[in-house]
Image: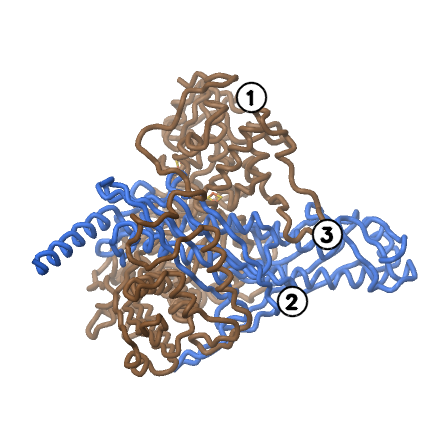
Amino acid sequence: MSSKCRGRGMAASWYGIARTATIDRAGAWAEIDDGGTAKIVTGVTEIGEGILTVLAQIAAEELGVRPEDVTIGDNDTARSPEAAHAGATRQTYMIGNSVALACRDARVRLDSEIADHWGVDAGSLKAFNGEIWAEKTNLKMTMEEAVDICKKRGVVPVGSGSFTAHGTGLDPEDGSGSPWQAYVYGCQVAEVEVDTVTGEVQVLGIWAAHDVGRAINPRGVEGQIEGGVVQGLGQALMEDYKLEDGHTTTHGFAKYILPTSLDVPQINSILIEDPDPLSPLGAKGIGEPSLVPTAPAIMNAIYDAIGVRITSLPATPEKILAGLVAKRERQGTRRHAAE
Amino acid sequence: MPTLDMEVTVNGRDVKRRATTQMRLLDFLRNELNLTGTKEGCGAGECGTCSVFVDGKLVKSCLMPAAKANGAEIETVEGLAKRGELTYLQRAFHKTGASQCGYCIPGMVMAATGALRENPHAGFDEIKERLGGNICRCTGYSKIFEAVELARDAMNGSLPTTALEGPGAGDSFIGNNVRRLDAPSKVTGALKYAGDMVMPGMLHMQVLRSPVAYALIKSIDISEAEAMPGVECVITADDVPGEDGFGVFVHDQPIMARGRVRYVGEAVAAVAAEDVETAMAALGKIKVEYENLPAVFDPEVAMAPGAPVLHDYAPGNIVKHIPIRKGDVEEGFAEADLVVEEDYGTQAVEHAYLEPEAGLAYVDPDGVVTVVSPSQNITHHRHMLAKIIDQPINKVRFIMSPVGGGFGGKEDMIYQGMLALAAMKSGQPVRLVFTREESIVSTAKRHPARITYKMGLKNDGRITAVEFRMVADGGAYGLSTEGVMRKAAILSCGPYDIANVKIDTYGVYTNNTPSGAFRTFGAMQAQFATESHLDICAGKLGLDPFEIRRINMMRSGALTHTKQKLGSVSLGLALDAAEKASNWESGPADVRGSSRSDLGKAGNREPCTLGSRIRASDGAGGKKDVA
Ligand code: FES
Ligand code: FES
């Protein structure tokens, strides 16, 4: 028999979006600026997830400009409205929606001036990609011209937005409560190859299906899934911060082993869009949820491959080999009992 | 300090500078030449963020003494393309979204550049192997591989260069793969993280950390350190003017140890001096007298009567207990045809963001205490610091610098308070940059958890009851433990409609490295147990893993474990999508790896085999001399 055994496993997951069991809130300011550009100010900075690009896309869409024309102010408690923390899978949901609201507010100012200028109903105005027009007419101009006209009429097209997510606290006795207004769900399948001689596990493929509400930037969502999966894989198979009487024995990357390019599986992302009905954008989130099902899917796949159930992470080669020995012993006893 | 005269060519320009003999090439580039695109992720040759070319050869500049590079031709990420331009590879990174936090990216770009210089036709496996010395914590590498292959093909002409361009506007910017706006600054190394920032007159901070897990501090003598030339100030808990305490939920952690140390690596004192070496030398002059206390390292032991008490406010060492009750589990188990019990364990995990903690603080001309750092929560940090330094909120300002990876690990105000105090005491800007080791020993980890699971089911697969108990090691301070226990409890039993649940999560103080926020906030540990357990039960009942989940899944309008009525539930869609995309062959969850026919199909990578995948270049351009 070959020493390489393959198997598959799956796991499902759920997750709540934004802060838990409390009211969450975020604010933003918007200004449609000279040259048909835009300024967005909100308390957020990139932590790597792509939020600045997502906010620029949202602002561009709402204001009728282009993403590259949007400038996003730095996160600074003295200069920008509160958007609170960069975590809890809340950036797109909380700050994205507050930016959308701020932009809509700014558009009300701009649109009422332009509608008046053209003598049309403000409701008939549409703007996209640097141009604004009145539907069912030939009236059209660049956003640059529109801002110029608006300002010449004495109005700076600014707006602000505040978005709230209504969670409630948990009852201290029975835990009842509504911790989030938006939930996401996911499911991952893992295919592994286990070497029964070395105990080494390789994850070859992951199929990751996740509901994100609405994917503002699908490639960015994939990036979050890929990153989450590989962190989950690291926890499943190799990462282990160890302490001996409070002193770590894993104080550098030589001892604390992280997944490298050679460890990663092919990751096949499937994006599901079940829009959130309680927010302007319908988008939910993906940062954290992508990690949740990976480790159990891998453990279930290992079991499928070799019949060893790892209940304590990480599934190191030593644990796999010990599991195989224990399994052989169990089978041996069973055979004896049968004889 | 002995010095030497360096004469090197850097990015095509001749440079003459004096360097100290112990300077690494990395320090020379960053500190002397201000080429901060070259990053220090580990300082030990293990991450690749410091990669540069020396005489055409890719090296890790943290391992090379500057002296050894004397006379050499050095190329850094800043020199790959002309200013304002991007190389094919950099454009490809931009196109595919290969940069997330960006901290590993200059090193990745260098390694990838090296790979394609070595072999312009490198295949997928070779690319992976050549990037094997570079760690990325954010991207899962996939989009990086895609970028390198794209650049290779565009350079070879097998793809038109238009393949490197971004998508058009289409009819919406929502749902559009707009290229990341921050990517050009990351692929060129132009973006400044906190540790890259300098201010005139800036001091450098070093931190004295506890060598013991639990002890009383009998005395701290800073007089000798303070008197050292070049030392501007030494701070301890005595310098805190206000209410000393921070934490995401309970404010139980002082800026620096106050009277007691509770874990190895806890900050005890800090020095701000004119350079890092002086600050470090001054640490050696601080005399701390400790009296060891009996410590506790196991959360179950810490919960038991008679255990040492870590925080006076919590006599049982419980940071937080979250109970959830729904229905009647005893009835549920009585109703069950099958009851399955199992224990699960998860380990402590390090965030390992490639950017170690760093910050810069100053007091502005209006007396506003300002801290620039990659903090994930400047709003809350401002509130806490205002109390700690006893200032009105508008006299405290936090600026969030680009975060080189966070994953929850940068939600804690673990060092910003020290920077603020030192800036206030010295009147000068102060910068602190953690070493990798310091980052690992002193900052929060993912909560290690032990979970006891009991599930009752009917023969048809319906779950009748679950009893779930999780004990998590919170370590020495509260940080996010309360919230982690809450989220773990709420999500514990998974998206399944279960009439009877009894859930308890406990976060417990011990003298271990504190645990805190880490991507999924407890949900991962809890659902690892649930999802493993479901497969065990499916195996016993002869059910397919998808089937047992479909039988039990919450549907739109279901009541959660906390009795929240759900709106639309997309779990069924997710199950269907994953099953279909993976071409899952259904069957009982019972070791059918050797017999199933859905293995080894599309969607997998090839298994790695021993032996190098690097082949000699076969293409035009040839192999460069790398000696
Ligand atoms: S390899 Fe040089 S800093 Fe990590
Ligand atoms: S993008 Fe690679 S470490 Fe963040």
Residue nearer the viewer, B66 or B482: B482
| Chain under numbered label 1 | B
Q: Is residue B300 visible in this depiction of the protein?
A: yes
Residue A313: name its quadrant: bottom left
Contact between marks 1 and 2 (CB within 8 A): the answer is no
- Do the dots labelled 1 and 2 sit on one chain? no
Residue B382, percent from left and from top? 52, 62
Q: Colour of chain A?
A: blue
| Residue for badge 2 | A162
Residue nearer the viewer, B6 or B380: B380
Amino acid at circle 3: Ala
Marker disc for residue B13: 1
| Chain under numbered label 2 | A
Which type of secondary structure does the marked residue at label 2 adopt?
strand
Which residue is found at the position 52% from the left and 75% from the top?
B557
Amino acid at circle 2: Ser
Residue A122, percent from left and from top? 84, 63
| Chain under numbered label 3 | A
Contact between marks 3 and 2 (CB within 8 A): the answer is no
